[in-house]
Amino acid sequence: MERLQKILAQAGVASRRKCEELILSGSVQVNGETVTTLGVKADPAEDSITVNGKPIKSESKLYLMLNKPKGVITSATDPKGRKVVGDYLPGIKERVYPVGRLDYDTEGLLLLTNDGEFANLLTHPKHHVPKTYLATVKGVPHGSLLDKLAKGIQLEDGMTAPAQVEYQDVDEEKKQAVITITIHEGRNRQVRRMFEAIGHPVTRLKRVRFGELGLLNLQRGKFRHLSPKEVQELLGLARKSHNVHKK
Ligand code: URA
């Protein structure tokens, strides 16, 4: 027996938190009875579980890494008809959803899965999974400004947690610099806002690492499946990061 929201998330319905909302809103039925509280357990092998009357699927789990190009929306559909990440997953029939998001203008490493539990663990704010970006910025920031970013900087929604920040490339002629920055949070447009706060706006942003997983030579617009070992390593890291930050 498992908690209903966990079963739904594992079946790829949505993230665990979204599934809780579905239950509370009366969209989920077990053996024909609508369940509206969160403590209920069920057995996916025995019980008939439906969401708005539709049986949930027991899909195999998929874990994908996409090198998202710039100008693509991290969502399943876009009312404005812009390109979405699903357009870059030919042959994938399962409904996968992104693990966190990258802005429309940000490129690079994006994980996608139909395992709601996995997505939840890796994106939960308390798990602090490190994410590394290459940020091309206007002008060449002084080292003391990068130190500020590394220590934590005040944004509208509070101080940022410590980050690792290094020069990758400095082009005095073009008046720009490429900075490697590793953050342990996932606030909206965080990297862009951090560089804006020191007066060096980002002109190009690429995520190159998620946890221990690097983008390496995956071509822009291409995806690959993660190996079971990579999946386990990510889960291990999420749990470990949680414990380290709890102390
Ligand atoms: N930080 C940003 O500013 N944008 C992203 O897409 C990811 C992190």
Image (spheres, grey):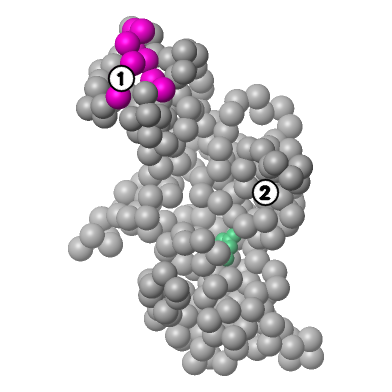
> At which x and y percent is residue 137?
66, 79
In this picture, which residue range is highlighted in magenta?
Answer: 27-36
Q: Residue at x 71, y 50 (%)?
A: 72
Residues marked 2 and 1 touching at CB (< 8 Å): no
Please say whether residue 202 is one of the residues in the magenta stretch. no
* Left or right of 240 in this view: 195: right
Q: Is residue 151 visible?
A: yes
Residue at label 2? 73
Task: Report the mark closest to the observer, 2 or 1.
Answer: 1
145 vs 228: above or below: below
One can see residue 45 in this view? no
**How many residues crowd around disc 1 within 10 Å: few (fewer than 14), some, or many (20 or more)?**
some
Kind of residue at badge 1 = Val
Q: Quadrant of ligand 1?
A: bottom right
Residue positioned 64% across, 78% down in the render? 201
The picture quadrant where one finds residue 138 is bottom right
Q: Name the residue tied to disc 1.
A: 35
* Left/right of residue 218 with respect to residue 33 in the rendered view: right
Magenta stretch, main secondary structure class: strand
* Quadrant housing the N terminus: top left
Determine the CA span between mark 2 and mark 1: 34 Å
Q: Earlier in the sequence, mark 2 or mark 1?
A: 1
The x and y percentages for residue 197 are: 53, 81
